[in-house]
Image (cartoon, rainbow, N blue to C red):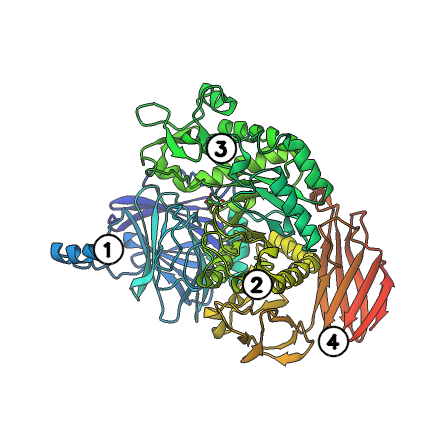
Amino acid sequence: MKNFGKLLSYSVEKNIIRLEFEFGRGRIEIIRDDIINVFSPFMSEEHYSKAIEGEKAVKTEFSVTPVKGGIKTETAKITAIINDGFLVDFYDKNGAALCRDSREERISPENMTEEGKRQLLLEGHAINEGYTDFDILIKKEVSPEECFYGLGDKTGVLNKRNYQYKMWNTDNPAPHVDTFEALYKTLPFLISLKNAGVYGIFFDNTFASVFNMAKENPNFYWYGVNGGNLDYYYIAGENLKEILTAYTFLTGRVPLPQAWALGYQQSRFSYMNESDVLQVADNMRKYDIPCDVIHLDIDYMDAFKVFTYSKKAFPNMKKTVKKLSDKGFKAVTIIDPGVKAEEGYSVYDSGINAKYFCKTKYGRVYNGTVWPGKSVFPDFGRKEVRDWWGENHKAPISWGISGIWNDMNEPANFKTALPDDLVMHDEGRKATHLEMHNVYGHNMSKATYEGLKKLTGKRPFVITRACYAGSQKYTTAWTGDNTSLWSHLQMAIPQLCNLGLSGMAFVGTDIGGFGGDTTPELMARWIEVGIFSPLCRNHCAKYRKYQEPWCFGDEVLNIYRKYVKLRYALLPYFYDNFRICEQKGYPIMRPLIFNYPEDKICRNKNDEFMLGENMLVAPVVEQGEEYKKVYLPKGNWYDYHTGEKIAGGKTFVRHAPLDTCPIYIKENSMLPTCEPTAFIGEKPNDTLRLEIFGEKAAYEHYTDNGTDFAYRNGEYNLYEFIYRNGEFSVNVKNDGYAGKYKNIVLKKGDKTVKAAFNNNLKIKI
Ligand code: GLC
């Protein structure tokens, strides 16, 4: 890292403190009283952020005063001291040191001897490349008990301490293990939790970066990057919730999805033709497994040409999609960024004519190799390229397709990595692959989202494999090519929780596992977890055992049905949590620590999670295990299956045979449910079932048309349900949506009361 030297002078201009050091310049920008940006122009004066759109700074009171060796700036929530060397230390308003730059140096480990390397290689071991140096290196002090969360889809346990990760979107189909440094996504945001408090830090730089989370030295973590600017945001808050609300204020939130997108989704690489697809659809109904979506993987295309379909496999795609729709299914098609390089193919021709594909530094269109063979890559950083890509969705939309699944957008290239110096653009600015790689999937998703929105007016449903911070505004995501392994079922929990803590809340894994062959037992346990993931899709690789729900015999089929029906019963609760996610940035699926930041046991809880505020799920994720060691945080809980009341703050053993996923509901809460249907919208959703747990509770429930953006103009209903002194009542907070409930079924313990629903209800129960 360069030496900034002494702080020579500073000046304050609006919300920016400009800093002149002996050997460089920096600036501190007050975004809000809880968000401060630290910046030095290593590459450019501008941020060029892909994550943050529009001006975020709001007028904020702050002071700037000189102190020994630097300056101090204070907002209502943060005290920052900027020292010589551009070392920046953050304190909370009570003076607790939360995030100080470490003064310790990294020590370069001794290089390996040639003989040592030879020995390791002989047995096929990887060679540790040793010490790497960075142009931009930030080191932050770490306390012994400090935990880290976030960082996206990375492998390993919930708490990211003691790992090293690399942010370089990577398609590596080998089974994802803890030693993997890079996966598909770049979400360079982390939350630190320690006894002194909590903070968030977002390193907004798209170049390949490395996070060493106190693995190299227990006294500090470091972030290093070669390329781009020194550009990070310090986020203050009282707890994880406040941090995530602020982070998603900056980078955006998951918009409410269409209601059907919360249904169960079935996929395979690939259902090869119309009869395959229709048979899957018919089986879903025959075996009584609720299902809303069937995915068409690459084989639906004509020679893997995007925006086309194979007339041989699907003689008339519009008719196929109509047949699906008549049975209550939506169809989602996969779209890859690699466009087949073939003259006469309109997507290729129009892209070539308009010069929309990435070029080598010598000005020739770059040819890579993906599914279609020789392929070219759209330069998604340019608006006109995104618009053109968006318009290409006219084809799938005309067939009746309801959503788009974006894959291979790291971007993946089969034979070699794309050259670092490939010419790409960031809007009008010429850039390189090295800079744009990690935002390639982000820009592709943005193109898809905007295209679908324009073409349909509905809330777009997009799934992506690769993304960057802020992609949550445009797309859902899945965790890529996992494997049918128990360890991958176990990993799914921390992985999805950390994605949620990184802003990407609408996420799921391939239920059952993509690679490898799932077993009946693993399938049963995976669906017991999978129904709680916001994105709920079973997907499987080519030539792997079929893993539709009926492929494992009656026992698994019955378990599968039971849990998918539970998912459908819980849809009103899911939808409420999606609304909270859009309003506040809270994830739907959360680690316990998010709700219980004071509870030290929750810091490292990897095998339980919360659904929203009120439901705790403690699934069995071990082969052959029939008992679950359950931890419940302090307070009383109700066993969802038996109704038994249990005091929390302790660990106990729950019998959990194959058909049982232990679920607990917090005392003094309510749970809205509905009658499960074969698909969303099969029957009018006119009866609300509301379960009351405990003697006093309040709960906000939200409904809207589940389709378009009318809710943003007030077309929604928001109810506050109150239960006090044995009486249930309703407080209507918004009454803008015409689709009203007709009935309500209240349940409390063994008691059930049915009534006609109206806004002035009062019911004794
Ligand atoms: C990639 C995707 C996988 C998909 C396959 C074929 O491996 O991750 O989900 O099935 O490509 O499109």
x then y, percent, for residue 382: 46, 30
Task: Pick whichever, 423 or 335, lies toward us.
Answer: 335
* Residue 467 in view in this figure: yes
* Residue 58 in view in this figure: no
Task: Tell me the crowding category of disc 4: few under 14, some 14 to 19, or many 20 or more residues within 10 angstroms, Cα based.
Answer: some
x then y, percent, for residue 750: 78, 76
Which of discs 3 and 4 lies nearer the camera? The answer is 3
Going by the numbered disc 4, the residue's amino acid type is Glu
Q: In the displayed structure, would residue 507 be above or below residue 666?
A: above
**Mark 4, secondary structure of its residue:** loop
Q: Residue at x 30, y 44 (%)?
A: 226
Task: Pick whichever, 699 or 751, lies toward us.
Answer: 751
Q: In the displayed structure, would residue 574 be above or below residue 311?
A: below
Reading the image, the residue beneath label 3 is: 304
Reading the image, the residue beneath label 1 is: 124
Going by the numbered disc 1, the residue's amino acid type is Gly
Question: Is label 1 in contact with label 2 (beta carbons under 8 Å)?
Answer: no
Which of discs 1 and 4 lies nearer the camera? The answer is 1
So how many labels did they put on this image?
4
Which of discs 4 and 2 lies nearer the camera? The answer is 2
Q: What separation in Å lies between label 1 and label 3 (alpha carbons)?
A: 36 Å
Task: Pick whichever, 281 or 306, lies toward us.
Answer: 281
Reading the image, the residue beneath label 4 is: 695
Q: Tag 3 or tag 1, which sits nearer the N-term?
A: 1
**Mark 2, secondary structure of its residue:** helix
Q: Tag 2 or tag 3, which sits nearer the N-term?
A: 3
**Mark 1, secondary structure of its residue:** loop
Reading the image, the residue beneath label 2 is: 524
Going by the numbered disc 2, the residue's amino acid type is Ala
